[in-house]
Image (tube, rainbow, N blue to C red):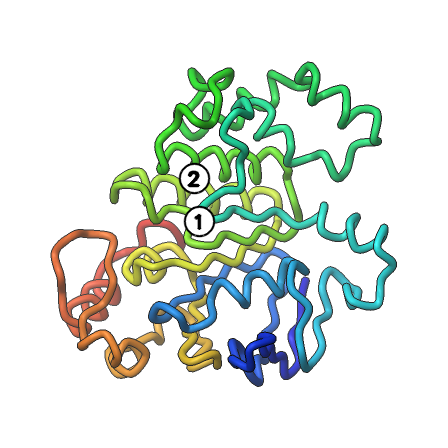
Amino acid sequence: MFTVHDLGLTHSNGFVALRDIALAARAGEHLAIIGPSGAGKTTLLRLLGAALRPTTGRLDLLGVDPWQLSAADLRRLRARIGVAHQAPPLPPRQRVVTAVLAGRLGRWPWWKALASLVYPLDIAGAASALARLDLGERIFDRCERLSGGQLQRVGVARVLYQQARLMLADEPVSALDPTLALQTVKLLTADAEARGATLVASLHAVDLALSCFPRIVGIREGRVAFDRPAADVDEALLRELYATEGGELPLLASEPRQVREVADAEAARPSACWR
């Protein structure tokens, strides 16, 4: 589904955001990216979504190098990738139904996309996606009337409606309470599994990543610190990854817990999301 070869990204001000990234995922694979704030998780997802061009290295995305494509072909490639943002870019006055249907605009002919902006052409499809996230009653509301957590779930609904083969989720549940966060991540993983889609999620909560994803990639200072099955992510790896945060992990639950407690708890109990 994608392969990253020695990828690097340096911003115009000279800041090196990513360096020497080597990463690959097969069709249908699910992996979570974790790491301290500023580690480069969002930048990596933007590269995988062909929203940023790498400074060095090569990216094979859905069988092509996106930066060797024409502008039109690049747009078509991006339309095959679903992205759930931490802060979904939804115009405040846009209706929720329109925001969800936008997931397929890149696959519709121009006349259909334009017509749907005037009158939504697949209200039933949008309603179905929103109902899966308990937002069915908000379908005709304007986005400005929704809370931050509800907007995140609308963004997830758009990705579900899009039915992309590659799904990228950048902190998609950061504004949700623990129960809703777990439900939403479980929905994303279940949808990806049912369709054989590849899912890559950047998650703040380490316990959520360990319980819901079979593969964990740790990012620190713009590099891949480790890439292992969740069962092999132990205390030493997590302690080193979050060393700059005082030995405490960012968790879904509000109570702070030490690295050893989280690693031991996740290793001892059956997974909540995957088997």
Residue kind at label 1, given as amino acid type: Gln
| Nearer-the-camera pick, 99 or 224 | 99
- In x, y percent, where is residue 172? 43, 48
Left or right of 39: which side holds 248? left
Residues at marks 2 and 1, CA–CA distance in whole angstroms: 7 Å
Residue at the image point whose x is 35% and y is 68% from the top? 37
Compared to residue 160, the image places residue 193 above or below, namely: below
Quadrant in the picture for residue 38: bottom left
* Secondary-structure class at tag 2: helix
Q: Give the residue number, with chain letter if any, for mark 1.
A: 86
Residue at the image point whose x is 65% and y is 64% from the top? 52
Classify mark 1: residues with Cα within 10 Å, few (<14), some (14-19) or many (20+).
Answer: many
- In x, y percent, where is residue 51? 65, 58
Classify mark 2: residues with Cα within 10 Å, few (<14), some (14-19) or many (20+).
Answer: many
Query: Which quadrant is the C terminus positioned in?
Result: bottom left
Residue at the image point whose x is 33% and y is 62% from the top? 210
Quadrant in the picture for residue 71: bottom right
Residue kind at label 2, given as amino acid type: Gln
- In x, y percent, where is residue 118? 70, 17
What label sits on residue 152 in the rendered view?
Answer: 2
* Secondary-structure class at tag 1: loop
| Nearer-the-camera pick, 223 or 12 | 12
- In x, y percent, where is residue 92? 49, 30
Compared to residue 203, the image places residue 174 above or below, namely: above
CB atoms at circles 2 and 1 under 8 Å apart?
yes
| Nearer-the-camera pick, 92 or 41 | 92
Mark with earlier residue (2, 1): 1
Residue at the image point whose x is 43% and y is 35% from the top? 151
